[in-house]
Amino acid sequence: MKQELQNTQFSLNFAGTKNNHLQDIEPYYNWRHLYAAEEDELSPFYGRTYSEFEFSQTVYNYYIHPQWDDFGSKTLYLKILFVDYEQNYAIIELIGEWNDAIGNDIMFLRRDVTDFLYAKGITKFIIVAENVLNFHSSDDSYYEEWREQVQDDGGWVVILNMPQQSQYDFKRARLINYVGLMEFPQWRTLKPDLVFQQVDNWVMKLLE
């Protein structure tokens, strides 16, 4: 019954967005000439191949575009848009429902993606969450651990443009004690190094 209610809530939230079909929402594509995770030998998705026509991954009963990457969650998918190993940052875009309560999505995100990148020197994570239409919290241990991990190396975690209904639950769980929430709607108009500079400056101002 609980799963059915969450499915209905996701459908209602999704119906209220400008896009009518999850399968039409592609990961941001304009940096592909600068970086592709499947071509990066240090990426957890190195060597993956994609189809433009075969839709197999779903969020509940909604198909998503085949360019998104599965990392273990049943309702949340991602795309690593850019990684800079010299400046130690990654930009990752998410889509779907972020569900720590049932799916423990933060565990999969940490263990199979961000910890992998951290081992390669990445300490600053920009998470684009515009298409995270629901968030369900559990305990905060993975978030606290994540902050402590990157903070030791001068790093941080910032989530961009999370929808208001998802932000509400994120803030209610007090996860902003560990992860920053930033509004940055113009990020698509900039190159990745400028996005990083803007977010890094925002974090530095918070710390002053």
Image (cartoon, rainbow, N blue to C red):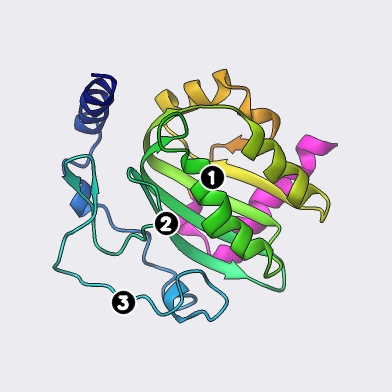
Which amino acid type corresponds to the residue marked 3 in the rendered image? Answer: Thr
Q: Which of marks 1 and 3 is nearer the N terminus?
A: 3
x, y percent for residue 57: 23, 55
CA–CA distance in space, label 1 to label 3: 25 Å
Q: Residue 140 carries which label?
A: none
Q: Nearer the viewer, residue 206 or 114?
A: 114
Q: Which of the two marks, 2 or 3, is nearer to us in this view?
A: 2
Q: Is mark 2 on a helix, strand or loop?
A: loop
Is residue 144 found inside the magenta-colored segment of the image?
A: no
Q: Is the magenta stretch mostly helix, strand or loop?
A: helix
Which amino acid type corresponds to the residue marked 2 in the rendered image? Answer: Phe
x, y percent for residue 13: 27, 27
76 left or right of 168 in image: left
Q: Is mark 3 on a helix, strand or loop?
A: loop
Q: Which mark is residue 71?
A: 2
Which amino acid type corresponds to the residue marked 1 in the rendered image? Answer: Met
Q: Residue 107 carries which label?
A: 1
Residues in magenta, as a range: 187-208
